[in-house]
C-alpha cells in the first residue's frame, strides 16, 4: 500500500489532470447530473431528502464498487496490472498539480497587470462571482481556495488512500463531487442535496484538522509564522459557515499573516462571511505563490506520513 500511495502521488505530480485522460471524477459528474435530472423532482421536503439520500448512496456506492471490480479484475489478469490500476485510481483522487497550475495562472495574470484575465482564471477555482473583484480580493480568494483545496484535493484523498486504499479514496472523491454539485443551500438543492452535504461534512472532519496542523507544520519548514498559524487556526477555525473549511483557511491565513473572508457575491447575492486572520501583511500577488509552496509541502508531508503509516502496518 505504501508503494501505491507514493506512486499515486508521483503520478499526479507528473501528469496532473489532462483533459484527454479518462478521469473518474468527470465520470462521477456525468452520473450525478443524470441522477439529479431523474430524481430531483419531489414536491415534499421528506421525499426530496429521501431521493437525495438514494442518489448519494447510488453515486458513492457505484463509484466504490466499480473501482473494486476494476482492481480485482486487473489483478486476476496479472498482479502488476492490478497494481497499475490501483495506482491509477489513487492518482485520480489527487489534485496536487492541478491546484498548482490553476492557482499559479491567477498569479501570472496579476503579475502581467491583467485584472480581467486574473478574474477569469480565479473563476475556475472559486464559486463566487469574480467579475468586479479588486486585486486584493482576487489574492485573498485564491489563497482561500488553495487552503481549502489542500484538504479536499490532497490531504483528505491521501488520508482515505492510506486507511482504505484506492476504493475508499474514490469513495471520498464521489462524496466531495456530490457536495460540489448538489450540496448547495438553495431552493433546488437545499433538501435534495442535504445528505450529500452532511456526508461531506462528516468525511472531511478529521482530514480538515490534519490539514490545518500540516499547514502550520509546513509553515515552520518554510520559515513562515507557524506559531501564528496555530493561533489563528485555534481562534478562527470555527468561524466559517462550514465545520471544516475554516480550519485550513485559518491556518493558511495565520501562516501568511493576512485576513481572508468578508463579503462575497454568489450568483448576484451578497454573502457576508466572518473575517479569518489578522491583516498584518500587505496583500500582494506573491502571496498566492507562498500559499502554493505551503500547500506543496503539506502534500509531501501527507504522502510521506501516509506511506509510513502503511509501511508500519
Image: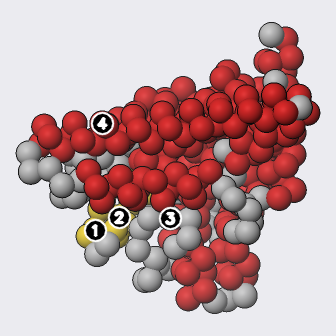
Q: Earlier in the sequence, mark 3 or mark 1?
A: 3
Outermost residue, front side: 77
The residue at which mark 2 appears reads as: 263
The residue at which mark 4 appears reads as: 53
Q: Position of residue 21 (x, y in %)?
A: 74, 62
The residue at which mark 1 appears reads as: 270
Instruction: For marks 4 and 3, give the CA distance.
Output: 26 Å
- Residue 262 — which label? none
Left/right placement of residue 139 relative to residue 41 reads: right
Quarter of the view holding residue 169: top right
Q: Dot 3 surroundings within 10 Å: few (below 14), some, or many (20 or more)?
A: some
Please say whether residue 178 is visible from this viewpoint: yes
Please say whether residue 233 is visible from this viewpoint: no
Question: What secondary structure is found at the residue carrying circle 4?
Answer: helix
Q: Earlier in the sequence, mark 2 or mark 1?
A: 2
Q: Earlier in the sequence, mark 4 or mark 3?
A: 4
The residue at which mark 3 appears reads as: 126
Amino acid at each position: 500500500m505504501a508503494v501505491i500511495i507514493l506512486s499515486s502521488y508521483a503520478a499526479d505530480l507528473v501528469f496532473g489532470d489532462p483533459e484527454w485522460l479518462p478521469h473518474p471524477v468527470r465520470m462521477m459528474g456525468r452520473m450525478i447530473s443524470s441522477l439529479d435530472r431523474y430524481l430531483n423532482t419531489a414536491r415534499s421536503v421528506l421525499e426530496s431528502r429521501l431521493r437525495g439520500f438514494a442518489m448519494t448512496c447510488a453515486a458513492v456506492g457505484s463509484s466504490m464498487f466499480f473501482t473494486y471490480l476494476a482492481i480485482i479484475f486487473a489483478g486476476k489478469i496479472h498482479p502488476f496490472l492490478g497494481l497499475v490500476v490501483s495506482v491509477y485510481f489513487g492518482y485520480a483522487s489527487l489534485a496536487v498539480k492541478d491546484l498548482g497550475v490553476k492557482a499559479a495562472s491567477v498569479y501570472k495574470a496579476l503579475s502581467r497587470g491583467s485584472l480581467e484575465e486574473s478574474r477569469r482564471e480565479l473563476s475556475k477555482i472559486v464559486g463566487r462571482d469574480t467579475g468586479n473583484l479588486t486585486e486584493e480580493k482576487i489574492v485573498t480568494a485564491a489563497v482561500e481556495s488553495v487552503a481549502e483545496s489542500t484538504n479536499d484535493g490532497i490531504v483528505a484523498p491521501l488520508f482515505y488512500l492510506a486507511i482504505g486504499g484506492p476504493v475508499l479514496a474514490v469513495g471520498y472523491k464521489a462524496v466531495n463531487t456530490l457536495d460540489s454539485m448538489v450540496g448547495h443551500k438553495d431552493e433546488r438543492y437545499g433538501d435534495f442535496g442535504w445528505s450529500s452535504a452532511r456526508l461531506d461534512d462528516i468525511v472531511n472532519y478529521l482530514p480538515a484538522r490534519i490539514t490545518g496542523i500540516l499547514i502550520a507544520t509546513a509553515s515552520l519548514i518554510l520559515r513562515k509564522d507557524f506559531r501564528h498559524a496555530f493561533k489563528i487556526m485555534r481562534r478562527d477555525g470555527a468561524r466559517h459557515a462550514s465545520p471544516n473549511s475554516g480550519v485550513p483557511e485559518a491556518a493558511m491565513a495565520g501562516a501568511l499573516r493576512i485576513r481572508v473572508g468578508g463579503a462575497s457575491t454568489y450568483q448576484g447575492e451578497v454573502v457576508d462571511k466572518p473575517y479569518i486572520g489578522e491583516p498584518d501583511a500587505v496583500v500582494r500577488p506573491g502571496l498566492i505563490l507562498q500559499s502554493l509552496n505551503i500547500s506543496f509541502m503539506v502534500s509531501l508531508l501527507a504522502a510521506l506520513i501516509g506511506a509510513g503509516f502503511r509501511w508500519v502496518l
